[in-house]
């Protein structure tokens, strides 16, 4: 595929994750293989507990695989140390968490500024304001997460993920906990940004409507990909 | 990065995360810089006023009239000279005797600095170039107050009646109050002979003041060096007033130690607050990691944030320290110097360094954990960083404490012993606190629901409770020691003296006056006192080897070797002396050159039984053989001597006589006629000296107490840090309890129970520790029976209950004011 040349290319090769628990070893993910061309969108579907969040964590380099490899832009995450992966994330990866993970002590604006500040952006405030207005939160810049509704928090989290213009965006259940209309707005927003910035979208969901919009669907069942 | 860390600081401040850290820092920096500013001012005052403090560029000082050749040498070089003579004596106004410090001065005095006088009390004083005219005396204002005199009245000094012509308000070479036992009277040198006050053996300081060009002075110094003077001491500007320096150094160490306690407690508060800060920032750190921050970047960001905080808090602390030092200067007003120069920059640097070292030493170890927060934490909350190794935390704390302490006391040995002492005290207090908490836990079943709730809280947060009890215990203990125990000790010591312990010393008695004075007391119904002769002598050789202060390392020994000894002839030892080596002489030994030495002195000077020691007595060399060593109890007011010789050895040498005796209150009126009959005799009232000492001690204690106030504040910071650390948990619990139907009042009573108990435990511990320390001091150090004072424990408990009870409830009350729904929705 020609898109292999551009950035935002994600690959999982024989990926597996095992943890040891008090009841012995537990296989969470087993032999996962797929590749996502840059600029495309993928939905990872599966029941609760099937391993979606774990998979996203591995792909984003937040966790290390027990077996196999994750490649982002042809860089093997397993060969980087923790700081190396952090630097890669700083340049290329955005993440929208299942439970938003907005910092409660910071306002919406400050939350969105954070990745820009960490990347030593020269005008974090302007960029953050801009992107917050894109997600319709321009009125809520100085509100704390506890003062925002669930949907607003989700939009804020998406704004934060897009703030640093990542090449790949991972979103964990971006529409979970949301009512239909709000969910629809979030989905539109994600794909809009995907189109404009050419961002590769990788989303875990059990929302069929969302999955239907994606170019590729991956089904997880008990930690394995099924057709 | 810099701006980002600034913003973080602001955001965390807004969230209230940093307040305790800042407050604790400010307290510590204030305490340290207050002490720093004060001692620095005195220190600079000493340097700047060095010439003034000896009233000349060069001074020759001696216990006898300065060898005339010296003055001739100075004059030959064209240098200017002046004389002063200083001694203590008893002045009489009407029938009232008063110990005074006489200073007779000649024209030209002072070469440096100026005298200031005034015509009437409480009026503006003025500088003068004059000195008192003949038969006139200038007196310190407090003398007039003491005797009820006013300017124009007469004052009897020795054989002359002087007219008080001026009030002397300032004298450059007087030094601070600490060194002036009695009020000053200044007279003209020409009157001194007529007063007949300078008898044989009187303790007199003769000074030759010299003024001139520096080059000439240097040449003069060289010349007198070649004279190899033994009786004269040369004081120059650089070594002016060593006693002031020593006193300052002591004060510096003492106040420094006091401030270090606040630093330690502030450190505990900071460590507690920093632990919570770190815990609450696990999420932020994880998010930073997700957004690609490297470990180093995270730690650098938080370090910078802390650094900003340290700098800001130190700025506030130093500013407050400047205010606080004004208070110390006020309390210790003129104790060291009569005027102090403006503060300098050095304590400012010290304040900032304290702030930074303290914050980095105590807060960084817990914060280092943030480095290790795995990014995975954003997905799984159970991911916490492996805890920072405790040795790292403790060594950080230990190192920062030790370095700050060293900076305060400049003495490695002291740092080691203080650190050891603190460690031991803290361990013992912690163990005791732990035991008390365990004991309390057993009471839980027997109290009502509110108390059970409170006691359960103490037991559950056991280590926090121990820390709080120890922190407050330390603070209260020190205050108890300083306030009640100090007085108990002084009273106990006075009570331990027999009822009729001597309360007056009579010195400077001449040989031909001994009989008359004994008769005088006999006639007035006072038990005839035993007078002791003493002859001044300078130790020159030990076993034929010339002694010099260079032979000894300790300051005490150096001092002893250069001072004059008083050889006192006695047929029998004083009743309370104990012979520890050799034996006392027999009547057949009288007239033989034997000598008895005080045992500690012998050890210090490395002199053994049967050694030979030579003394220079009035220019003649005499050799004595050590026949015995004695132990002496110096705490009684009996007359005792370091050096005693058999009767008949010194019969030809000029002696002066001393005695001590007990005068009943109504017999004190005898002093005035005695001094009238024998003007050269000086009577010293021990009670007056004691009250003088007490008043100086009171002021010094007040200053130290003031500094310790900061350690109580730091203790409060520890309490609030601990409360804050438990706040989330408390809020959640109380919400749950309230939804289960607990009334607000019950929960409030529970809080009261908790903090009152904590305070009581701290106070109990403090009272116990203070009493133990006082007992050790009394029995082991000062050797008198200690009277236990149950009030100390009571005072400790009351202080603890009030302080901790009120502060604790105030700090936690907000937990109850929030509607439970809010708390439960937010979760923990
Ligand atoms: N470190 C771990 N230790 C033990 N079990 C784990 C660990 N990490 C994940 N699991 C388990 O692995 C399984 C997959 O977890 P994961 O969070 O990936 O599921 P998910 O598909 O995202 O579910 P949901 O839709 O509910 O979010 C779960 O059963 C989880 O309990
Ligand atoms: Mg999940």
Image (tube, coloured by chain):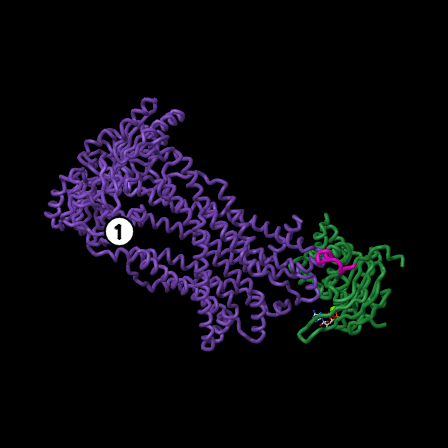
Chain colours: A green, B purple
Q: Position of residue B813 (x, y in %)?
A: 52, 65
Majority secondary structure in the magenta region: helix
Q: Quadrant of the C terminus of chain B?
A: bottom right
Q: Position of residue B406 (x, y in %)?
A: 47, 49
Inspect this view and state whether residue B128 appears: no
Q: Chain of mark 1?
A: B
Ligand 2 shows up in the quarter that is bottom right
Segment tinted magenta in the rendering: A76-86
For mark 1, does the 10 Å Cα neighbourhood hold few (<14), some (14 to 19), or many (20 or more) residues?
few
A51, above or below B558, in the image: below
Say left or right for A79 vs B305.
right
Seen as rendered, the residue at the extreme right is A1
Residue sitting at 33 percent across and 25 percent down? B80
| Residue A79 within the segment the image draws in magenta | yes
Inspect this view and state whether residue B393 appears: yes
Seen as rendered, the residue at the extreme bottom is B445
Say left or right for B301 vs B209.
right
Where residue A62 sits, quadrant-wise, is bottom right
Residue sitting at 86 percent across and 55 percent down? A5
Number of numbered markers:
1
Q: Position of residue A168 (x, y in %)?
A: 80, 59
Which residue, given by chain and number where applicable, does mark 1 sit on? B634
Element on which disc 1 rests: loop
Where residue B677 sits, quadrant-wise, is top left
Residue sitting at 44 percent across and 63 percent down? B429
Say left or right for B214 vs A213.
left
Q: Position of residue A182 (x, y in %)?
A: 77, 65
């Amino acid at each position: 595929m020609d898109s292999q040349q551009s950035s935002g290319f994600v690959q999982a090769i024989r990926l597996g994750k095992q943890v040891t628990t008090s009841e012995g070893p537990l296989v969470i993910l087993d032999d996962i293989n797929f590749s996502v061309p840059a600029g495309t969108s993928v939905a990872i579907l599966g029941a609760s507990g099937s391993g979606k969040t774990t998979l996203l964590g591995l792909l984003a380099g937040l966790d290390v695989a027990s077996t196999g490899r994750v490649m982002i832009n042809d860089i093997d995450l397993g060969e980087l140390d923790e700081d190396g992966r952090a630097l890669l994330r700083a340049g290329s990866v955005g993440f929208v968490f299942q439970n938003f993970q907005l910092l409660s002590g910071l306002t919406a604006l400050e939350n969105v500024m954070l990745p820009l500040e960490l990347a030593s952006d020269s005008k974090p405030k302007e960029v953050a304001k801009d992107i917050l207005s894109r997600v319709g939160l321009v009125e809520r810049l100085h509100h704390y997460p506890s003062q925002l509704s669930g949907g607003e928090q989700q939009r804020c989290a998406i704004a934060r993920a897009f703030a640093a213009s990542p090449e790949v965006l991972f979103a964990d259940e971006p529409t979970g906990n949301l009512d239909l209309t709000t969910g629809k707005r979030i989905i539109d927003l994600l794909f809009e940004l995907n189109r404009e910035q050419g961002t590769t979208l990788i989303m875990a969901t059990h929302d069929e409507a969302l999955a239907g919009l994606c170019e590729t669907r991956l089904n997880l069942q008990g930690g394995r990909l099924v057709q | 990065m810099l701006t980002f860390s600034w913003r973080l600081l602001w955001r965390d401040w807004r969230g209230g995360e940093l307040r305790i850290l800042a407050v604790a820092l400010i307290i510590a920096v204030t305490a340290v810089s207050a002490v720093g500013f004060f001692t620095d001012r005195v220190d600079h005052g000493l340097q700047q006023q060095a010439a003034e403090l000896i009233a000349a560029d060069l001074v020759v000082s001696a216990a006898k009239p300065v060898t005339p050749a010296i003055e001739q040498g100075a004059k030959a070089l064209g240098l200017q000279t002046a004389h002063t003579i200083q001694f203590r004596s008893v002045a009489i106004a009407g029938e009232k005797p008063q110990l005074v410090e006489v200073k007779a001065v000649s024209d030209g005095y002072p070469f440096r600095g100026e005298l200031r006088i005034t015509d009437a009390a409480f009026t503006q004083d003025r500088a003068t170039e004059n000195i008192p005219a003949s038969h006139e005396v200038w007196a310190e204002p407090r003398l007039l107050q003491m005797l009820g005199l006013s300017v124009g009245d007469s004052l009897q000094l020795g054989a002359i009646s002087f007219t008080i012509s001026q009030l002397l308000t300032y004298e450059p070479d007087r030094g601070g109050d600490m060194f002036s036992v009695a009020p000053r009277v200044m007279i003209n040198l020409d009157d001194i002979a007529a007063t007949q006050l300078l008898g044989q053996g009187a303790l007199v300081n003769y000074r030759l003041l010299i003024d001139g060009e520096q080059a000439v002075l240097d040449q003069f110094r060289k010349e007198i060096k070649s004279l190899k003077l033994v009786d004269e001491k040369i004081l120059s500007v650089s070594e002016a007033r060593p006693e002031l320096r020593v006193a300052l150094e002591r004060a510096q160490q003492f106040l420094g130690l006091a401030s270090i306690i606040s630093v330690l407690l502030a450190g505990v508060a900071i460590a507690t607050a920093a632990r919570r800060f770190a815990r609450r920032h696990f999420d932020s750190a994880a998010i930073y990691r997700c957004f690609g921050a490297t470990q180093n970047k995270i730690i650098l960001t938080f370090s910078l944030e802390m650094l900003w905080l340290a700098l800001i808090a130190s700025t506030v602390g130093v500013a407050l320290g400047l205010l606080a030092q004004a208070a110390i200067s006020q309390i210790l007003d003129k104790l060291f110097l009569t005027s102090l120069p403006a503060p300098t920059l050095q304590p400012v640097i010290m304040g900032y360094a304290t702030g930074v070292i303290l914050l980095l030493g105590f807060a960084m170890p817990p914060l280092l954990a943030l480095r290790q927060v795995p990014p995975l934490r954003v997905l799984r909350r159970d991911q916490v960083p492996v805890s920072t190794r405790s040795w790292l935390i403790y060594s950080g704390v230990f190192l920062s404490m030790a370095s700050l302490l060293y900076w305060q006391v400049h003495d490695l040995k002291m740092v080691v012993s203080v650190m050891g002492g603190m460690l031991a005290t803290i361990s013992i207090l912690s163990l005791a606190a732990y035991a008390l908490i365990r004991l309390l836990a057993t009471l839980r079943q027997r109290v009502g629901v509110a108390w059970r709730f409170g006691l359960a809280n103490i037991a559950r947060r056991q280590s926090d409770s121990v820390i709080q009890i120890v922190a407050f215990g330390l603070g209260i203990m020190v205050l108890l020691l300083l306030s009640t125990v100090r007085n108990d000790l002084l009273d106990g010591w006075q009570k331990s003296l027999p009822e009729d312990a001597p309360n007056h010393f009579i010195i400077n008695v001449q040989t031909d006056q001994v009989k008359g004075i004994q008769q005088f007391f006999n006639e007035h119904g006072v038990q005839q006192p035993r007078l002791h002769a003493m002859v001044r002598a300078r130790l020159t050789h030990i076993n034929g080897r010339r002694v010099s202060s260079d032979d000894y390392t300790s300051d005490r020994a150096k001092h002893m070797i250069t001072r004059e000894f008083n050889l006192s002839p006695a047929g029998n030892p004083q009743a309370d002396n104990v012979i520890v080596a050799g034996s006392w002489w027999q009547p057949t030994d009288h007239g033989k050159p034997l000598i008895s030495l005080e045992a500690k002195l012998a050890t210090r000077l490395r002199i053994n039984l049967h050694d030979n020691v030579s003394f220079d007595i009035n220019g003649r060399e005499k050799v004595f053989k050590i026949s015995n060593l004695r132990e002496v109890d110096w705490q009684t007011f009996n007359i005792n001597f370091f050096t005693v010789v058999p009767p008949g050895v010194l019969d030809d040498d000029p002696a002066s006589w001393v005695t001590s005796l007990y005068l009943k209150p109504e017999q004190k009126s005898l002093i005035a006629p005695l001094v009238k009959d024998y003007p050269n005799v000086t009577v010293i009232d021990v009670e007056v000296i004691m009250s003088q000492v007490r008043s100086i001690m009171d002021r010094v204690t007040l200053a130290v107490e003031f500094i310790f106030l900061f350690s109580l504040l730091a203790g409060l910071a520890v309490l609030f840090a601990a409360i804050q650390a438990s706040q989330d948990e408390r809020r959640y619990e109380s919400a749950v309890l309230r939804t289960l139907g607990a009334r607000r009042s019950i929960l409030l009573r529970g809080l009261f129970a908790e903090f009152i108990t904590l305070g009581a435990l701290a106070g109990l511990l403090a009272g116990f520790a203070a009493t133990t320390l006082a007992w050790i001091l009394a029995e082991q150090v000062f050797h008198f029976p200690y009277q236990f004072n149950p009030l100390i424990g009571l005072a400790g408990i009351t202080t603890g209950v009030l302080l901790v009870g009120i502060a604790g409830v105030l700090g936690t009350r907000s937990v109850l004011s929030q509607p439970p729904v809010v708390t439960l929705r937010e979760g923990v």
